[in-house]
Image (tube, rainbow, N blue to C red):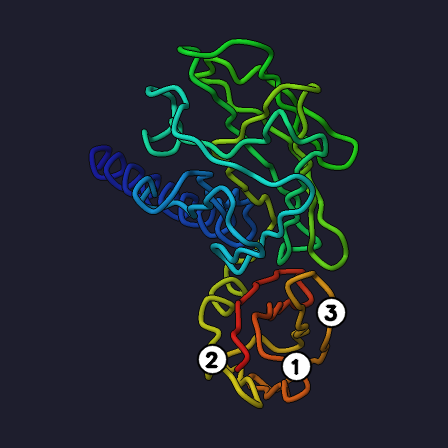
Amino acid sequence: MNHFNTLFMKKLLLILWIILCVTSFKSTQANTVANDTIAKINFTVDNSLSAPGWDNVFGGISSPVTINNGIIITISGSPFKSGPSGEPNTVLPAKVGSTYNFLASSNNDPVILAFAGLDPVAKYTFAIFSSRAAAGTSGDKTTVFSIGSQSVSINALGNKSVMLSIPDVKSSASGSVELTISRPQGQAGYINALIITKSSTTFSNNLKQFNDVEIYPVPAKNYVNLSNLPVQSQIAVFDITGKKLIETANGNNPEIQVNVKSLNSGTYIFRIFNTSSIIRSYKIIKE
């Protein structure tokens, strides 16, 4: 009898342990803080030095440039040039760490990278790699990166492993952030790579619904159809400068049609968000 009771208690404890684990897992899934990499940008020379899995931006390229997740980069200020003379062995893949865009010593103004299409309620971390091979050059290659009141800097000469970080970056209400790149007078400044991660509280059920959203046709001419929307969603349309052009809502209807007849041909960002402040951005081409 005692043996039976012992087995019974062991099984009961096992069942209780399983129930506890499942409950804990569901609770974790229901409300999680996720750090999502939304962009990995390789500032490089040309297609021959493009890195797989990265958004490759070439020195001297005309802006705006549309990259992953519908993010649009506009380059202003002094022009970017490019070079393949980064350190050959760094913490990043070879075609990322060893190539760069740079601000030439002959240009006095900084470079300004404006990012549009970001989530206005989220916080971001901008991780930056700046490197110039030590062989064959000298001087002060200190490069300064600034967003709002935050600034970080590094002497890029010979850098193989140090990643700079600008945390807790919030975009403007229109979803834009400006990164300013500068350097000492008469010297050059370098950027090899930029990784943008987003930290946001999400809810699994709503996140699944957003992953199922359908937007068509692409490209669009007069109307854009959205289906499988979460109820009580807001839909806003922005141009590549971050200016809001259209705003509407779907109420309790999982489908909505947005009239884009008045928009000029070009690239636009559709941003969808609901009462849980979950936002998704989609790039749409208007014919």
Residue drawn at x 58%, y 57% as measured from the top left: 64
Give the amino acid at mark 3.
Lys
Q: Which residue is mark 1?
A: 263
Q: Earlier in the sequence, mark 2 or mark 3?
A: 2
Q: Nearer the viewer, residue 59 or 130?
A: 59
Q: Give left or right: position of 66 versus 113.
A: left
User: SS of the residue at dot 3?
Assistant: strand
Q: Give left or right: position of 147 versus 272.
A: right
Residue 254 sits in quarter: bottom right
- The N terminus - image quarter: top left
Give the amino acid at mark 2.
Pro
User: SS of the residue at dot 1?
Assistant: loop
* Rendering coords of residue 170 (x, y %): 71, 45
Q: Nearer the viewer, residue 122 or 34?
A: 122
* Rendering coords of residue 287 (x, y %): 52, 82
Give the amino acid at mark 1.
Leu
Residue drawn at x 40%, y 43% as measured from the top left: 21
Q: Which mark is residue 244?
A: 3
Q: CA distance from mark 1 to mark 3?
A: 12 Å
Q: Earlier in the sequence, mark 1 or mark 3?
A: 3
Q: CA distance from mark 2 to mark 1?
A: 13 Å
* Rendering coords of residue 44 (x, y %): 42, 38
Q: Give left or right: position of 4 versus 256.
A: left
Q: Which residue is mark 2?
A: 219
Residue drawn at x 46%, y 66% as measured from the top left: 211
Mark 1: give few (<14), some (14-19) or many (20+) Cα within 10 Å. some
Residue 241 sits in quarter: bottom right
Q: CA distance from mark 2 to mark 3?
A: 20 Å
Q: Earlier in the sequence, mark 2 or mark 1?
A: 2
* Rendering coords of residue 132 (x, y %): 47, 20
User: SS of the residue at dot 2?
Assistant: loop
